[in-house]
Image: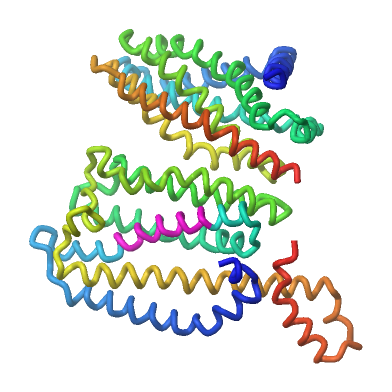
Amino acid sequence: MNGFLAILQRDLRLALRQGADSVMVVAFFIVTTTLFPFGVGPEVNILARIASGVIWVSALLAAMLSLERVFQADYEDGTLELLTLSPVSLELLILGKVLAHWLTTGLPLIIAAPLMAVMLNMDQDGFVTLMIAMLLGTPALSLIGAIGAALILGARRGGVLVSLLVLPLYIPVLIFGAGAVEAALLGISATAQLQIMAAILLLTLAAAPFATAHAVRQAME
Amino acid sequence: MHRFAKPSVFLKFTAPILPWLSALTVILIAAGLYFSLIGSPVDYQQGHTVRIMYIHVPAAWMGLFCYVGMAICGAMSLIWKHPLADICARATAPVGATFTALCLITGSLWGEPMWGTWWVWDARLTSMLILLFLYLGYMALVNAFDDPERGSKAGSALALVGAVNVPIVKFSVDWWNTLHQPASIVRMDGPAVDPSMQLPLALMILGFTCYYFVVLILRVRLELNERRIRALHLSGMFEDPETPTSAKEQAYEAGHNAGAKQ
């Protein structure tokens, strides 16, 4: 547990000292979302209708673009090798790194999401559901993304590759995340969608650290 | 099974099978095509369009079958580190991707006259599209490393993670309300397809499966032979005029296991 906290602290400190990373993710999210009114026209009804989907897709892309940060720097300077060799289980350390990634990308996105929902004229009924859905969905995105980030360590053109690997696996989160908000906007209970998202989160929480650790060990061989 | 994981055993074992399997594939697909295009009745609602089914359903089956095969090969290569399992997984991916693409294309050709649209975003179609993306991702990942072995290992892990999608594809028609019809062949109370249509469908499915194995064997043999040639080139024996021909032949035979050396 100490190792988990230590790595969490270290990654958080690194992210905060560099600072720009989290801001960049949120900036990307906001800029991408702003592109849609230009693309589909500023009509209020249309924007309100597509708001939940737009927010989710932008969040997905923002989370994906920040994945490189999870392992790449540590891989290049050899930290990852030491982590692999350490007596603390690698799965736990990876969980710490993923949690740090979520705290510095997922959480800012959740805070920025209502702002963008207001700008896209989304109905107020959906706000709480959107926040809950993102709270359940973004950790799953970080966990799934870590697998992809670990798989591409040492690959050529890793950045493009990770999108091809990770985006298909993100689709369930997108479907149920947008579906939950949609249901709330229609005035139906979104419990079913949120429960499925919780299930996805639990499944990835249980399985992803092992897959990621496996991929990291391979990259170290 | 471990006995066959040795490349030389694989080469020796598959050499006599290959011509028979190829002949069987040709016969099955020829018979299947005859029955599906000429020898089977026209659907009372769909007319001749129903004949698309005889390509569409086997292609969908193969798309899933190849992915499961790829994931099993991936698991075997991770657990027992068989080099042959890696080669099989790599050889399966493009075949499976082609079948999945074929399934999507024939599906949209069938959908246009029947549903009035080329594409709908329902669960079965979308999950099949994701399957295609998973294949493409696997192929891109496997070829992205300078060290092919590292590529195979990363690919195996991805194939296993992506296997989550297979049951989703299979059961998507039962879990969600979709435009796509529910499962009609593998069901608890027997197939819902008319017996006169079952025969061509079964022939085509068997034919496609045999075709996959023929292509798999050919591709694996090609890869093994390529490795053997590479190993011989590296040994420098062939460039040396002093070496007698018999020694070269011997080295070529011994090179059967070139792929097995890690």
Residue B35 position within the rendered picture, expressed as x and y whole percent measured from the top left:
22, 76
Q: Is residue B61 magenta?
A: yes
Q: Quadrant of residue B103?
A: bottom left
| Image colouring | rainbow
Specify the quadrant that holds the N terminus of chain B.
bottom right
Residues B168 and A87: in front is A87
Please indicate whether residue B116 sits to the left or right of residue A215 in the image: left
Residues B89 and A21: in front is B89
Question: What kind of secondary structure does the magenta stretch mostly adopt?
Answer: helix
Please indicate whether residue A119 sits to the left or right of residue A77 in the image: left
Residue that sits furthest to the left in the current view: B44
Image point (31%, 79%), residue name: B30
As drawn, B147 above or below A6: below
Image point (50%, 27%), residue name: A140
Image point (22%, 66%), residue name: B51
Residue B90 position within the rendered picture, expressed as x and y whole percent measured from the top left:
57, 59
As drawn, A120 above or below B121: above
Please indicate whether residue A167 sits to the left or right of residue B29 in the image: right
Residues A148 and B2: in front is B2
As drawn, A52 above or below A72: above
Q: Is residue A19 magenta?
A: no
Please indicate whether residue B153 sits to the left or right of residue B51 in the image: right
Magenta-highlighted residues: B56-72
Image point (25%, 63%), residue name: B52
Number of numbered discs overlaid on the protein picture: 0
- The reply to whether residue A167 is in sight is yes
- The reply to whether residue A76 is in sight is no
Residue B249 position within the rendered picture, expressed as x and y whole percent measured from the top left:
76, 87
Specify the quadrant that holds the C terminus of chain B.
bottom right
Q: Quadrant of residue B198?
A: bottom left
Residue B186 position within the rendered picture, expressed as x and y whole percent measured from the top left:
26, 56
